[in-house]
Image (cartoon, helix red, strand yellow):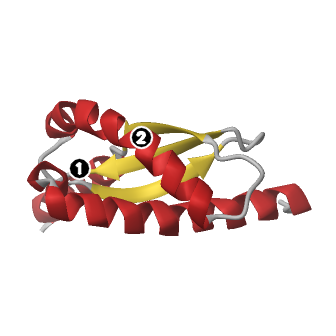
Amino acid sequence: MRSTVQDIKRRQKESLLYREISKLFLEVALDNPGFQSLFINKVVLSPDKGLCTVYFYSPKGIDFFKTQLEALKLFKPSLRKALSQTINSRRVPQIVFAFDSQLEKQEHIEQLLDQIKQEND
């Protein structure tokens, strides 16, 4: 699969947004104890660069994330303003928060593989 220049530029911007959002979220998490169990896993930018999805993971699960989602939504306007001041871009994308269940799926698969391995021994 060949990467086009647009894909490369989008991934570079995703990386920049990931770094900046992580820094800003860390500052907020120090003040808000509820956010200390949330971790940013990845940032995905839409092809038109108008929508940025920030994926969070929490060892406490998706239910904990859902309880913190309303507080995260209150944080969104100040996050966009801070991003507009730190990144050189014509426009700052809309931000959407989502739960990343990929790690939970990976752990479940590893447990199943370990179980199969133990049964075969």
Closer-to-camera residue (121/80): 80
Name the residue tied to disc 2.
76
Amino acid type for the residue under numbered disc 2: Lys
Q: Which mark is residue 73?
A: none
Residue positioned 35% across, 34% down in the render: 73
Residue 13 in sight: yes
Question: Mark 1 — residue?
Answer: 108
Please state the horizontal and vertical placement of residue 42, each as a whole percent of the image.
47, 57
3 or 63: which is nearer to us? 63
Q: In which quarter of the view is residue 66 placed?
A: top left
Callout 1: helix, strand or loop? helix
Q: Residues within 10 Å of mark 2 (few under 14, many from 20)?
A: some
Decide: is 94 above or below 56. Answer: above
Which quadrant of the rendered structure holds the N terminus?
bottom right
Q: Residue at x 24, y 56 (%)?
A: 107
Quarter of the image for residue 94 reads: top right
Q: Point out the image quarter for the C terminus.
A: bottom left
Amino acid under disc 1 = His
Give whichever of discs 1 and 2 has the lower sequence position: 2
How far across and down, in percent of the image, does residue 6 sit? 86, 56
SS type, badge 2: helix
